[in-house]
Each structure stands twice: as structure tokens, then as C-alpha cells.
Image (cartoon, helix red, strand yellow):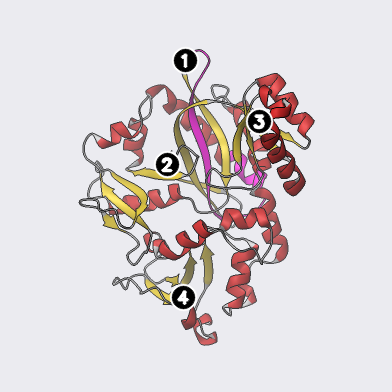
Amino acid sequence: MPKLHIFNPSHDEALAAGSPFYYPTSAARTLAHDLSALPAVWAAEDDLILLPDHLPAPQSAIPAFIHENELTATRWETIDGIIPWGWDALVRHRMAGLGAPSHLLPPDHKLEAIRQLSSRQTAVSLLPLLREDVPATVGRSCWCTSINEVWQMTDSWGEIMLKAPWSGSGRGVFRMSPADRSENSGSRQGRVLRILREQGAIEAEPFYHRVADLAMEFRMLSDGHAVYEGLSLFTTTPTGGYAGNLVASEATLLSLLPPETHTVLEAVRTSLLRRLPPLLDGHYQGLLGVDMMLVRHTDLSLRLHPCVEINLRRTMGAVAVSLRRLLPSPAACALFTLRPTSATVSGAINLTPGANKVSAMLTPASDTAPSSFFKF
């Protein structure tokens, strides 16, 4: 029996809101509409992809596409499971409204467990464990519950990065320095106080000179074990939003990273396979991504920060891993990006035909493109 796939990019926002009645931002609604066909990249041949009623189904019939108004009680009887981009109260409320039977929907306690584990506090807890296992890595963070604790971090570290417990795509992340303690920096202080008031805490970490973004993708199984899915090399916009992924074999991606990082990455992967199961304690099944970064250390060497963030959902990095199967050869590379629909790229494959504003594109990379994707 097929599973029903849903692309709900409002997931991170919905976690922050914590309400089934949250109304997604305009940007999230645009992505949900325009990229609704994206699950065709990873769905099984007999699965179903949910589309908005007014969006024409792509020509491809494998996997099949289904509109919301086609989800009758009889059709629900033929569906074996629901796989959203990420589970939250909003998407469960939406599926219930479309007639999904209760046995296909997670109960309240499971949703709350996913929400709590999706907080950045989980990454704060995991980071020292990875540092203990792999001393060659770098990274510090602190979970602050008052603005006085934030000021203590600026006293200790100087310039810091502050991150709201729940946020996504660069939102809720901003820099702060000791100078912001002055009376003329009320806007940033106000932002900190608002996050503390609304979400109860804020993460602080030293400001790092980031050189490259990467992630490791995993799958948590029903028996609690973690399975490694693949490496992700990606870029972000100046504001921290997602810009694109390099799609290539594991060996090719590793070859683009400095040789001195290979052993460290292997050790971090081994550590994560051991540390993730007890950390999540059986409360989460499915894909997750652990964001990392290569940073320029004080001695000018490159070091790996092994846990910048944990995403308990499918990620664009996981999409890039799934796209490897479309490469014509093990040595081939491509760029996976989100682009304005009006932009034309020679040789690109449009993965989301019918989009109005934003399209997911897979563009074959030239011989020089992979090496220029990251510059060390």
C-alpha cells in the first residue's frame, strides 16, 4: 500500500508557534505551493504526492500525484502512512481536516516530544559529547535563560551568535557584541528579551569564522538505531537562508574537503551513530540532519564544528542525497538550487513543474564547478 508524501516547509515555523492553528508566513506558503511536487525525488514508485487542488499534476505518473479533493474516505483506506517534510501540530491538524484516520496521525505526546527535541537545546546537549569523542573538533555553546547570562557570554567570548530555540532558514539567528550592552542598542536587547519571553531561553555561542557549511544525514529506525545516509555540502545566503547543494557521490564530496578533515569527519560520524540513539530515546523515527561547519581557528588551521544544529525532519541535504541516483555516472556532479521560476538555466532539470514563483532545479555541473563550490 502507498504512503502519502507532503511537502510542508512551514515546519520550523510551526514548531516555534506550537499551535495547530498557526498561519504560515507568505514565504512558507509560496514554497509549499510551488515545491509541492518535490517529494517525487524520494518517494517510492507506488507512493502518492499530495498537491494543492488548483495545481496541475506533472506529466510523470510515477510516483502518482493526488489532489486534496481526491482524498475520500475510500481513498484513505488504501493509504498505509503519511510522510510529511516534518511532523508538527499544524500538519497533523491539516491532515485530520482532510479526513486522515487517527491511526495515521501521531498522538499529542509524540508531537510534543518531537517539538522539544527539535529545540536547539538538543544541539547544545550533543555538542560537548561529540567534542569529548573527537577532541580535534571545535565548538562551544550555552543555553541562556536570562539576559544576564547572555551578557556573561559576551564578557567571556566577545562577539557571539544568538539563536532562538525554534527557528529556521537563518531566522531567529543574530550577532551580539559587548557594545550591544549600551543604551543605544535597545533593539537587539529587545529582541533577546522577546525570545526569552516567548520561548523561554536562547542559545549563545562564540562567533566563528565560517569557511564552509556541511551536514551529515541520518535515518532513525523504529528500533532506535541510527543509520548514516550521506554527506551534504551546501551554501547559504548572507542572511543564513538555504542557497543550494552540491549533488555528487560520497567520494567526490569528500575529495572537495581538505584532506586533514577526512579522519575527523569519519570519527564524528561514528560518534553520532553512537550518541543519537540515547539522545532521542526512541521518540523520533525518520530522517534527520546534523548541520556542521568548517571554521578558521585562531591558529589559522581549519577545524570542524560538529554540531551547529539538528533538524529532526527531512532536509535539503537529504534531498541532495536522494538526487544522486539521477547522476549519469559516479563521477558526475550537479547543483541543486531553488531559483525564481522566471530564471532559465541551460541544461537544468525542473524538479517542480507548474511552480509560479520558485522552482527546484538540478543543473549539471561543469568540471570546474565542484571545486569552485567551496574555496578554502
Query: What residue is shown at x 69% (from left), y 58% (from top)?
Result: 18
Query: What residue is shown at x 65% (from left), y 20% (from top)?
Result: 158
Q: Label 3: state its secondary structure.
A: loop
**Residue 241 visible in the snapshot:** yes
Q: Nearer the viewer, mark 4 or mark 3?
A: 3
Distance Cα–Cα, label 1 vs label 4: 55 Å
Residue 162 found in image quarter:
top right
Which portion, as a residue range, is magenta?
274-299
Q: Nearer the viewer, mark 4 or mark 2?
A: 2
Residue 300 marker: 1
Distance Cα–Cα, label 4 vs label 2: 31 Å
Q: Nearer the viewer, mark 2 or mark 1?
A: 1
Q: Nearer the viewer, mark 1 or mark 4?
A: 1
Q: Are marks 2 and 1 in contact (CB under 8 Å)?
A: no
Q: Estimate the x, y position of residue 246 in percent, counting from the top left.
A: 35, 42
- Say whether disc 2 or disc 1 marks the residue closer to the N-terminus: 2
The three-letter amino acid code for the residue at tag 4 is Met
The three-letter amino acid code for the residue at tag 1 is Leu
Q: Nearer the viewer, residue 295 or 122?
A: 295
Q: Label 1: state its secondary structure.
A: loop
* Residue under pointer 3: 141
On screen, residue 20 above or below 330: below
Q: Estimate the x, y position of residue 213 in percent, counting from the top left.
A: 45, 35
On the picture, is 95 further left or further right than 40?
Answer: right
The three-letter amino acid code for the residue at tag 3 is Ser
Q: Estimate the x, y position of residue 312 in percent, counting from the top left.
A: 58, 51
* Residue under pointer 2: 232
On the picture, is 304 further left or further right than 139?
Answer: left
Distance Cα–Cα, label 3 vs label 2: 23 Å
